[in-house]
Image: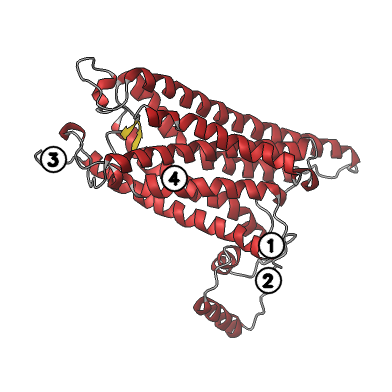
């Protein structure tokens, strides 16, 4: 096979996702490390934090094998008309990439959905940590996503449906791709009928939990708004009505939705367009290369940003870098020495918030505001 002339799109598909994938790997690693440190210190870990931890693990794995590795796991002996830039893998590595990536995406998406339900149940129905520590409660939330994800991603292995997608990664696709819409091209791996069946299953489940996330976040904000409105009757005449909790919940809810839905929206739209017209648009492909790999990076923001804001509120005299180092639990002797010398120079003593969960190091998301 002669060396193909690589287009800008093919090169971008192989290189750009690595940047977002690397950022997501770092963010998820910091998140997992933070929770692990709490375990090591025998600190009480709230159930929502455990769910975020459960989301971070598959997100980290997916960020590495899909977004960072990209075409490195694609077979080098791929047909010339759908060859991959920087391909260095085999059929086995391609199958592994497709299976692991899709399983992790499904698993994290389902945990995201359950997390939205947990926060809504905590505010609307008063679910307590005592209730959420019960073994039955935890099994009911942690086990089903694993069963559903594997139930959907294992069967395609037997149909050889994990193949090179044509740009950057191996995913749910027959091989060669043209056999999906051209009857004159035989499928060497997979078949059209199985592809269509599993495709609609994955799209259906994806649409279901995406809609569920949005619905429960809206219901959550409405529930807190109703609680604050009920408190308005205790205000004295002329006292200003405050909606602090509603505003903060809405703000955090927006971050929460953006961290998942916005990152994957280009993928969903591109999949639908490809199904209808046989291929997606180049502009949408570039957006997807940039946005989708940042999923784990935004997840880290959802976890750490509320804690960062709380720390800044309690330590307004401290710098942003100092706050970031504290929140991320980064121990850098040189940085601490530099910060100390700055304090000595100015003659100001910085009062730091406690590491206790009731002050500057609170549990993420709604525990900041509930």
Question: Residue, x 56% and y 80% (percent of image)?
Answer: 342
Instruction: State which mark lies toward you, 2 or 3.
Output: 3
Tell me, yes or no, whether the two marked residues, 2 and 4, touch with CB atoms within 8 Å. Answer: no
Residue 365 appears in the picture as rendered:
no
Q: Mark 4 points at which residue?
A: 62
> Gap in Å between the C-alphas at discs 3 and 1?
55 Å
Instruction: State which mark lies toward you, 2 or 4.
Output: 4
- For mark 2, give the secondary structure: loop
Q: Is residue 8 left or right of residue 255?
A: left
Q: How many labels does the image show?
A: 4
Q: Which of 35 and 94 is in front in this view?
A: 94
Ranked by sequence position, the earlier of labels 2 and 4 is 4
Tell me, yes or no, whether the two marked residues, 3 and 1, touch with CB atoms within 8 Å. Answer: no
Residue 212 - label = none
* Quadrant of residue 154 within the rendered picture: top left
Question: Residue, x 25% and y 23% (percent of image)?
Answer: 187
Display colour scheme: secondary structure
Q: Mark 2 points at which residue?
A: 352
Please say if 94 is above or below 338: above
- For mark 4, give the secondary structure: helix
Tell me, yes or no, whether the two marked residues, 2 and 1, touch with CB atoms within 8 Å. Answer: yes
Q: Name the residue under label 3.
A: 5
Ranked by sequence position, the earlier of labels 3 and 1 is 3
> Gap in Å between the C-alphas at discs 2 and 3?
58 Å
> Gap in Å between the C-alphas at discs 2 and 4?
37 Å
> Gap in Å between the C-alphas at discs 4 and 3?
29 Å
Residue 107 appears in the picture as rendered:
yes
- For mark 1, give the secondary structure: loop
- For mark 3, give the secondary structure: loop
Q: Mark 1 points at which residue?
A: 360
Q: Badge 2 local density, few (<14 within 10 Å), some, or many (20+)?
A: some
């Amino acid at each position: 096979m002669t060396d193909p002339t690589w287009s800008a799109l093919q090169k971008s598909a192989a290189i750009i996702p690595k940047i977002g994938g690397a950022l997501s790997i770092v963010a998820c690693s910091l998140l997992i490390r933070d929770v692990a440190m709490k375990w090591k210190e025998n600190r009480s870990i709230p159930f929502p934090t455990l769910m975020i931890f459960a989301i971070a693990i598959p997100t980290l794995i997916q960020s590495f094998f899909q977004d960072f590795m990209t075409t490195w796991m694609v077979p080098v002996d791929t047909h010339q008309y759908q060859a991959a830039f920087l391909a260095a893998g085999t059929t086995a590595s391609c199958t592994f990439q497709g299976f692991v990536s899709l399983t992790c995406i499904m698993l994290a998406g389902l945990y995201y959905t359950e997390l939205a339900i947990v926060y809504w149940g905590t505010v609307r129905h008063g679910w307590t940590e005592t209730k959420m520590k019960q073994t039955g409660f935890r099994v009911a939330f942690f086990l089903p996503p694993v069963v559903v994800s594997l139930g959907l991603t294992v069967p395609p292995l037997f149909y050889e449906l994990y193949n090179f997608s044509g740009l950057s990664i191996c995913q749910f696709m027959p091989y060669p791709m043209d056999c999906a819409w051209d009857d004159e091209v035989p499928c060497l791996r997979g078949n059209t009928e199985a592809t269509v069946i599993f495709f609609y299953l994955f799209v259906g489940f994806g649409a279901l939990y995406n809609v569920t996330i949005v619905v429960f976040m809206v219901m959550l904000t409405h529930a807190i708004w109703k609680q604050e409105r009920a408190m308005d009757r205790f205000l004295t005449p002329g006292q200003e009505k405050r909606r602090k909790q509603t505003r903060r919940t809405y703000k955090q809810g927006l971050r929460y939705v953006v961290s998942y839905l916005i990152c994957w929206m280009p993928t969903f739209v591109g999949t639908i367009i490809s199904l209808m017209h046989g291929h997606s648009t180049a502009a949408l492909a570039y957006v997807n290369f940039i946005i989708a790999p940042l999923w784990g990076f935004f997840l880290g923001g959802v976890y750490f940003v509320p804690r960062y804001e709380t720390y800044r509120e309690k330590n307004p005299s401290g710098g942003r870098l100092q706050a970031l180092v504290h929140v991320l639990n980064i121990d850098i002797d040189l940085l601490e020495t530099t910060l100390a010398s700055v304090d000595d120079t100015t003659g100001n003593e910085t009062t730091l918030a406690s590491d206790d969960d009731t002050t500057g190091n609170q549990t993420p998301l709604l525990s900041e505001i509930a």
